[in-house]
Amino acid sequence: MLAIARALMLNPKLLLLDEPSLGLAPLVIREIFEIVTAINREAGTTILVVEQNANLALRSAQIAYVLEVGRVTLSGKSSELAKNESIRKSYLGD
Protein backbone atom coordinates (compact mmCIF):
# COMPACT_ATOMS: atom_id res chain seq x y z
CA MET A 1 0.00 0.00 0.00
CA LEU A 2 2.89 2.33 0.69
CA ALA A 3 4.30 1.78 -2.80
CA ILE A 4 0.92 2.58 -4.34
CA ALA A 5 0.59 5.70 -2.17
CA ARG A 6 4.06 6.90 -3.16
CA ALA A 7 3.26 6.43 -6.83
CA LEU A 8 -0.04 8.29 -6.49
CA MET A 9 1.71 11.33 -5.01
CA LEU A 10 2.93 12.08 -8.54
CA ASN A 11 -0.67 12.09 -9.85
CA PRO A 12 0.11 9.64 -12.67
CA LYS A 13 -2.04 9.03 -15.72
CA LEU A 14 -0.88 5.40 -15.72
CA LEU A 15 -0.09 3.24 -12.70
CA LEU A 16 1.78 -0.05 -13.25
CA LEU A 17 1.42 -2.79 -10.63
CA ASP A 18 3.43 -6.01 -10.80
CA GLU A 19 1.92 -8.87 -8.77
CA PRO A 20 0.25 -6.71 -6.10
CA SER A 21 -1.20 -9.82 -4.41
CA LEU A 22 2.07 -11.72 -4.09
CA GLY A 23 2.64 -13.02 -0.58
CA LEU A 24 -0.28 -11.17 1.01
CA ALA A 25 -3.14 -12.43 3.14
CA PRO A 26 -6.49 -12.80 1.33
CA LEU A 27 -8.10 -9.92 3.28
CA VAL A 28 -5.23 -7.59 2.37
CA ILE A 29 -5.41 -8.66 -1.27
CA ARG A 30 -9.12 -7.88 -1.38
CA GLU A 31 -8.51 -4.45 0.18
CA ILE A 32 -5.72 -3.61 -2.25
CA PHE A 33 -7.83 -4.52 -5.27
CA GLU A 34 -10.77 -2.52 -3.90
CA ILE A 35 -8.45 0.48 -3.54
CA VAL A 36 -7.00 -0.01 -7.02
CA THR A 37 -10.51 -0.20 -8.48
CA ALA A 38 -11.49 2.99 -6.63
CA ILE A 39 -8.39 4.80 -7.92
CA ASN A 40 -9.35 3.87 -11.46
CA ARG A 41 -12.99 4.83 -11.03
CA GLU A 42 -12.61 8.02 -8.98
CA ALA A 43 -9.32 9.50 -10.21
CA GLY A 44 -9.58 8.19 -13.76
CA THR A 45 -6.07 6.73 -13.50
CA THR A 46 -5.38 3.94 -15.96
CA ILE A 47 -3.97 0.94 -14.14
CA LEU A 48 -1.98 -1.89 -15.71
CA VAL A 49 -1.77 -4.91 -13.41
CA VAL A 50 0.40 -7.95 -14.02
CA GLU A 51 -1.15 -10.69 -11.93
CA GLN A 52 -0.90 -14.48 -11.92
CA ASN A 53 -4.10 -14.88 -9.92
CA ALA A 54 -6.29 -15.04 -13.02
CA ASN A 55 -9.61 -15.13 -11.14
CA LEU A 56 -8.75 -11.99 -9.22
CA ALA A 57 -7.36 -10.22 -12.27
CA LEU A 58 -10.39 -10.97 -14.44
CA ARG A 59 -12.84 -9.89 -11.71
CA SER A 60 -11.01 -6.59 -11.21
CA ALA A 61 -10.12 -5.59 -14.76
CA GLN A 62 -12.12 -4.14 -17.59
CA ILE A 63 -9.80 -5.40 -20.32
CA ALA A 64 -7.45 -8.38 -20.07
CA TYR A 65 -4.55 -9.80 -22.02
CA VAL A 66 -3.32 -13.38 -21.80
CA LEU A 67 0.42 -13.76 -22.32
CA GLU A 68 2.06 -17.03 -23.24
CA VAL A 69 5.83 -17.12 -23.68
CA GLY A 70 5.91 -13.33 -23.83
CA ARG A 71 3.27 -12.97 -26.53
CA VAL A 72 -0.34 -11.84 -26.32
CA THR A 73 -2.45 -14.86 -27.25
CA LEU A 74 -5.87 -13.55 -26.23
CA SER A 75 -7.29 -10.15 -25.35
CA GLY A 76 -10.67 -8.59 -24.79
CA LYS A 77 -13.18 -7.64 -22.16
CA SER A 78 -12.42 -9.40 -18.91
CA SER A 79 -16.00 -10.58 -18.55
CA GLU A 80 -15.81 -12.26 -21.96
CA LEU A 81 -12.41 -13.86 -21.30
CA ALA A 82 -13.70 -15.21 -17.98
CA LYS A 83 -16.36 -17.12 -19.95
CA ASN A 84 -13.88 -18.47 -22.54
CA GLU A 85 -13.67 -22.25 -22.19
CA SER A 86 -9.92 -22.49 -22.88
CA ILE A 87 -9.20 -19.73 -20.36
CA ARG A 88 -11.40 -21.42 -17.77
CA LYS A 89 -9.59 -24.74 -18.20
CA SER A 90 -6.07 -23.37 -18.42
CA TYR A 91 -6.08 -20.51 -15.93
CA LEU A 92 -9.17 -20.64 -13.74
CA GLY A 93 -9.09 -24.26 -12.68
CA ASP A 94 -12.50 -25.17 -14.11
Image (cartoon, grey):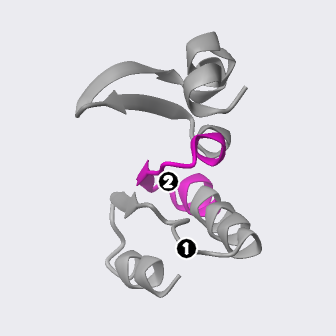
Is 46 inside the magenta-drawn segment? Answer: yes
Q: Give the range drawn in magenta.
A: 38-57
Q: Which residue lies furthest to the top in this view?
A: 85
Dot 1 or dot 2, earlier in sequence:
1
Residue ID at (64%, 48%)? 56
- Percent position of residue 21, x then y: 55, 65
- Labels 1, 2: front one: 1
Residue ID at (32%, 29%)? 68
- 57 or 48: nearer the viewer: 57
**Pointer 2: residues within 10 angstroms few (<14), some, or many (20+)?**
few
Helix or strand or loop: what does disc 2 sit on?
A: loop
Q: Residue furthest left?
A: 70
- Percent position of residue 42, x then y: 61, 59
Disc 1 vs disc 2: Cβ atoms closer than 8 Å? no
Q: What residue type is labelled 2?
A: Gly
Q: Distance between the residues labelled 1 and 2?
A: 28 Å
> Image check: 87 left or right of 29?
left
Instruction: Identify residue for label 2.
Output: 44
Instruction: Identify residue for label 1.
Output: 23
Is 47 inside the magenta-drawn segment? Answer: yes
